[in-house]
Image (cartoon, rainbow, N blue to C red):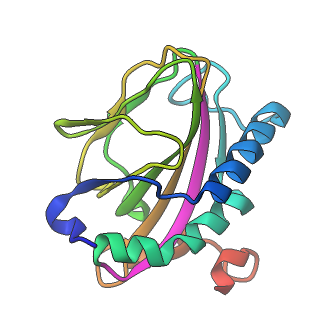
């Protein structure tokens, strides 16, 4: 349990259960292998697959809401999930996030080739499969240096404080009639 507003970021070991980790890793590998049109051309133009609001990772977003509320000490609305399969020479440029990422968690599914630290302000974290970093995405700069491995699979789960300045971004303003996450 904690107060994320005070801490700004924190490491959570074994954020995912072993079953979630095994299913998610296989699922995201398949998504990458079958990907035909969801490629990151903004951050990197090297074949990194990316998936916004995917049904599986949106399910993890919803399922982890109670854990996120416990870990942050906040009442939260989910906004969206975003997954990426990074490949050789990928980079996550130093940045702060948009309002729908007020409280974010970067979840590591798996990697091949090397450790790839996640950096937040003056700290650097080496994550194992299932580990996560919770951070205030709009407040703290976060990034990764160029990746030297084969692949690295990461999901970002985003939330907003129900009592905070970005609460209107709940569900990332997705359409209630067409998006099942809104029916929760």
Query: Residue 29: percent from the left, percent from the top?
Result: 74, 37
Q: Quadrant of the C terminus?
A: bottom right
Q: Which range is magenta? A: 74-87
Vertical comparison of 139 with 169: above or below? above
Q: Quadrant of residue 162?
A: bottom left
Magenta part, dominant SS? strand
Q: Is residue 153 something one can see in this rendering? A: no
Q: Quadrant of residue 73?
A: bottom left
Please tell me whether residue 81 belongs to the stretch shown in magenta. yes
Query: Residue 62: percent from the left, percent from the top?
Result: 58, 73
- Taking the image as shown, residue 148 lies to the left or right of residue 95, namely right
Q: Quadrant of residue 33?
A: top right
Vertical comparison of 153 with 90: above or below? below
Q: Quadrant of the N terminus?
A: bottom left
Q: Residue at x 55, y 73 (%)?
A: 171
Residue nearest the observer in this picture, 102 or 29: 29
Vertical comparison of 146 with 101: above or below? above
Q: Is residue 32 something one can see in this rendering? A: yes
Q: Residue at x 78, y 41 (%)?
A: 31
Residue nearest the observer in this picture, 25 or 56: 25
Please tell me whether residue 75 belongs to the stretch shown in magenta. yes
């Amino acid at each position: 349990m904690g107060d994320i507003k005070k801490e700004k970021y924190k490491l959570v070991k074994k954020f995912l259960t072993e079953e979630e980790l095994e299913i998610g890793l296989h699922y995201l590998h398949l998504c990458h292998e079958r990907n035909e049109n969801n490629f990151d051309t903004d951050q990197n133009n090297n074949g990194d697959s990316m998936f916004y609001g995917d049904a599986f990772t949106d399910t993890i977003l919803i399922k982890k809401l109670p854990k996120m509320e416990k870990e942050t000490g906040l009442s939260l609305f989910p906004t969206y999930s975003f997954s990426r399969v990074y490949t050789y020479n990928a980079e996550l440029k130093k940045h702060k996030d948009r309002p729908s990422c007020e409280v974010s968690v970067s979840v590591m599914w798996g990697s091949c080739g090397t450790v790839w630290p996640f950096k937040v302000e003056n700290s650097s974290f080496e994550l194992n499969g299932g580990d996560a970093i919770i951070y205030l995405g709009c407040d703290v700069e976060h990034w990764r240096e160029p990746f030297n491995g084969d692949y690295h699979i990461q999901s970002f789960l985003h939330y907003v404080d129900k009592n905070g300045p970005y609460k209107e971004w709940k569900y990332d303003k997705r359409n209630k009639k067409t998006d099942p996450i809104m029916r929760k």
